[in-house]
Amino acid sequence: MIIIEEERASDSPFVERIWRSHSESVNPFLSIAVNHCEFVVSRLQGKVTMTLRGPETKATPIGNAPAEGEWVGILLKLGTFLPHLPTS
């Protein structure tokens, strides 16, 4: 089960909110459709990675969220853009 431990609003004009969560067991993970971007820092089996996600036009099954995973997310405000990052 993935548990949202904390979520709070931000004082930044570019950040809507910040959240953190963890998983206790292996569970299916579905990425929902959203109109914003977010940075997600993941720690899985001792390895730390950073991902930039969104916007997404439809829900996407990602696979299984592993047990003992930890995540911190920085949700950007609508309209915030990152012009120096390549698109894929």
Image (spheres, helix red, strand yellow):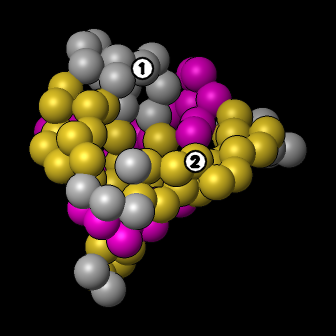
Task: Residue at 22%, 41% (x, y): give it.
Answer: 28
Q: Residue furthest top?
A: 57
Residue type marked 2: Ile
- Relative to the observer, which residue lies in front, 85 or 40? 40
Q: Considering only vertical position in the picture, is 7 above or below 68?
A: above
The dominant secondary structure in magenta is loop
Mark nearer the N terminus (2 vs 1): 2
Find the residue positioned furthest to the right: 11
**Residue at horizontal 69 percent and vertical 34 percent from the top:** 16
Q: Is residue 55 left or right of residue 30?
A: right
Callout 2 secondary element: strand
Q: Position of residue 45 (x, y in %)?
A: 27, 80
Q: Nearer the viewer, residue 32 or 24?
A: 24
Q: Nearer the viewer, residue 5 or 78?
A: 5
For badge 1, the amino acid type reads Val
- x and y, in percent, of residue 8 in the image: 77, 44
Residue matched to label 1: 34
Residue marked by disc 2: 4
Q: From where the camera sits, is residue 36 visible? A: yes
Query: Is residue 50 among what the camera can see?
Result: no
Region rendered in magenta: 66-88
Vertically, is 52 above or below 16?
A: below
Q: Quick check: 74 left or right of 61?
A: right
Could you say which is closer to the camera, residue 40 or residue 66?
66
Magenta stretch holds residue 74: yes
How many angstroms separate mark 2 from mark 1 (CA)? Answer: 18 Å
